Every structure is written in C-alpha cells, then in structure tokens.
Image: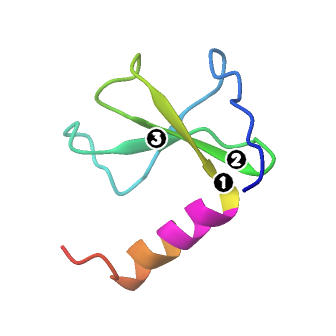
C-alpha cells in the first residue's frame, strides 16, 4: 500500500455535482487539483471531516456509479 498524504484543505474550493440540485439533498463535494488524491466531504457538513481517496479508486467509483453498478 502506498503512503498517502493528507492534503491541506482549509483554503480549497469544493465542487458539488451539477446533478445535486438546489434542495440540499444527500450530496458529496470534491476538491480537485491534488495530484493522486481526491478529497471528498459531505455537503451537509462542510466543517466536518473530509476523506482523501486515491485518485484511481475515486475514478473507478465514479465509473461504477455512471454504469449503475450500485443500484438506486
């Protein structure tokens, strides 16, 4: 397992999916721009914890969501 670093996230710009709508539903936000890592947080708890996923794992997850691998 590769050593991962925890990115500094205090000044990043978080991005929410355009599919989220404006109702404040169950959404995640990502902070792009980190080499090899994708920080993710719960949009309903912006001051809560963030997770940092390996970029290839995040890409595989997004591809699975788009392919419908996880159901409704």
Query: In this figure, which residue is indicated by the disc labeled 2?
Result: 37
- Where 61 falls versus 34 (above or below)? below
Residue 64's place in the image compared with 49, above or below, is below
Is 18 left or right of 21, judged from the image as shown? right
Label 1 packing within 10 angstroms: few (<14), some (14-19), many (20+): some
- The location of residue 66, given as percent across then percent down, is 42, 77
Residue at disc 3, secondary structure = strand
Q: Tell which residue pokes out farthest to the right in this image.
A: 35
Q: Is residue 13 left or right of residue 18?
A: right
Q: Which residues are magenta?
A: 56-61
Q: Which residue is mark 1?
A: 54
Circle number at residue 29: 3
Label 2: how many Cα within 10 Å (few below 14, some 14–19, many 20+): many
Q: Residue at x 33, y 82 (%)?
A: 68
Expressed as whole percent of the image width and height from the top left, the position of residue 65 reads 39, 73
Disc 3 to disc 1: CB gap under 8 Å: no
């Amino acid at each position: 397992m590769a050593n991962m670093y925890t990115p500094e996230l205090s000044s990043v710009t978080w991005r929410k999916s355009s599919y989220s709508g404006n109702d404040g539903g169950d959404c995640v936000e990502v902070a792009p721009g980190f080499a090899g890592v994708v920080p993710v947080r719960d949009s309903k708890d912006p001051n809560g914890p963030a997770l940092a996923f390996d970029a290839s794992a995040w890409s595989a997850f997004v591809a699975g969501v788009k392919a419908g691998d996880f159901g409704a």
